[in-house]
Amino acid sequence: MSITSTLARSQHKLSDDTFRQLRDYIYTLTGIYFQNNKKYLLEGRLGKRIQILNISSFENYLQYIRNGKGQFDELQFLYDAVTINETYFFRNEPQFEAFEKHLIPEIVQSRKYNGRSKIKIWSAASSSGEEAYTLAMIFLDKLKPRFPDLDVEIVGTDISQSVIEIAKRGVYKDYSIRNMPEYYLKKYFSVQDGKYHVHDSVKQFVRFEKQNLFDQSRMRFMRNFDVIYCCNVLIYFDLKSKVQVVSNLYNSLNPGGYLFIGYAESLHGISTAYKLINFPKTVVYKKE
Ligand SMILES: C[S@@+](CC[C@H](N)C(=O)[O-])C[C@H]1O[C@@H](n2cnc3c(N)ncnc32)[C@H](O)[C@@H]1O
């Protein structure tokens, strides 16, 4: 349903004052910041939810979530309402090229000196899992034959429980596979009822869990990663939350580890801790 029709159905009006309070509440929990010109988005998305709950106004809804009534479940709905989950397989191909051809061979080489044969990869803000499964397919198809002793652990996390459930199922529609090379589709998916099911041979390398990048206490448990993909999520944060999240990701990386962010994102003015490295049509940030 379009936002316009949602608004038409909703009798509730979001006042500027309540918008600011809701926006601040969401920001404190998630780091996601709604600029003033995005008020209509919150009004449309939460208006529908308020109707379902039979709550009479945005003011009462704010009270409802603040008072913690049905807190856990309602926060899930809130997170679903305020996040954008757009993703697809092989979204940014130059990043995957750099990963396969340069980063992993370099990490494998350094492992010869420290004896570890497992690489840890984190798809932070994984949405429904396409990025994490792309990495698992590249590992299986290109890296494992080249480095038979190499093992991998891929973790996909997202703040939204509903996209994590989709990721765990690993069943996708046409939209998700639109950029995927035919070769991978044929080799690592089976088609049932017009949907694409990821093979278990790929799924075995990936696990998914709910994780809020803005939750300092949980972030402390995310450690020793060799490569982190944190793509197309920083754009929803304000400067302060970007700085916090990017600094936490730094602590989550092994020395020599790499961070990818989205094509349209940059760490300029956010962190000087990483070294910027150029690859064809992409850049990556290194923890030295
Ligand atoms: C546009 S998707 C990007 C998916 C994937 N990384 C990609 O580039 O294709 C952004 C994801 O970030 C998640 N997200 C937003 N705020 C978050 C937070 N504070 N912690 C974890 N995930 C968050 C959203 O739920 C959404 O699934």
Image (cartoon, rainbow, N blue to C red):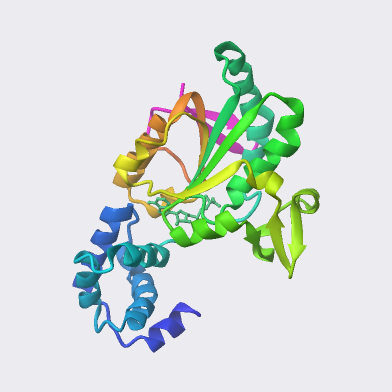
Residue 18 spot, x, y in % from top left? 21, 71
Name the spot of residue 250 as percent of width and height, x first: 40, 31
Nearest the camera: 16 or 137?
137
Asked whether residue 72 is drawn in magenta, I would say no
Of the pair 116 and 212, the residue shown nearer to us: 116
Q: In the image, is 267 to the left or to the right of 260? A: left
Q: State whether residue 282 is above or below residue 78.
A: above
Whether residue 288 is visible here, answered yes or no, is yes
Q: How many marks?
A: 0
Classify 208 as above or below 268: below
Which residue is pictured at 57% across the width and 29% down the height? 119
Q: Is residue 198 left or right of residue 261?
A: right
Q: Position of residue 288 (x, y in %)?
A: 46, 21
Instruction: Please say whether residue 269 is visible from this viewpoint.
Output: no
Q: Nearer the viewer, residue 265 or 28?
A: 28
Q: Residue at x 65, y 39 (%)?
A: 96
Q: Is residue 142 above or below residue 89?
A: above
Residue bounds of the magenta highlight: 269-288
Q: Residue 202 occupies which quadrant of the picture?
A: top right
Residue at 74% from the left image edge and 66% from the top image edge: 192
Query: Is 220 positioned to the left or the right of 279 in the image?
Result: left
Residue at (30% x, 41% y) in the render: 216
Q: Please give left or right for residue 6 compared with residue 39 in the image.
A: right
Q: Image quarter for residue 113?
A: top right
Residue 266 versus residue 120 in the image, above or below: below
For residue 287: magenta? yes
Q: Residue furthest top?
A: 113
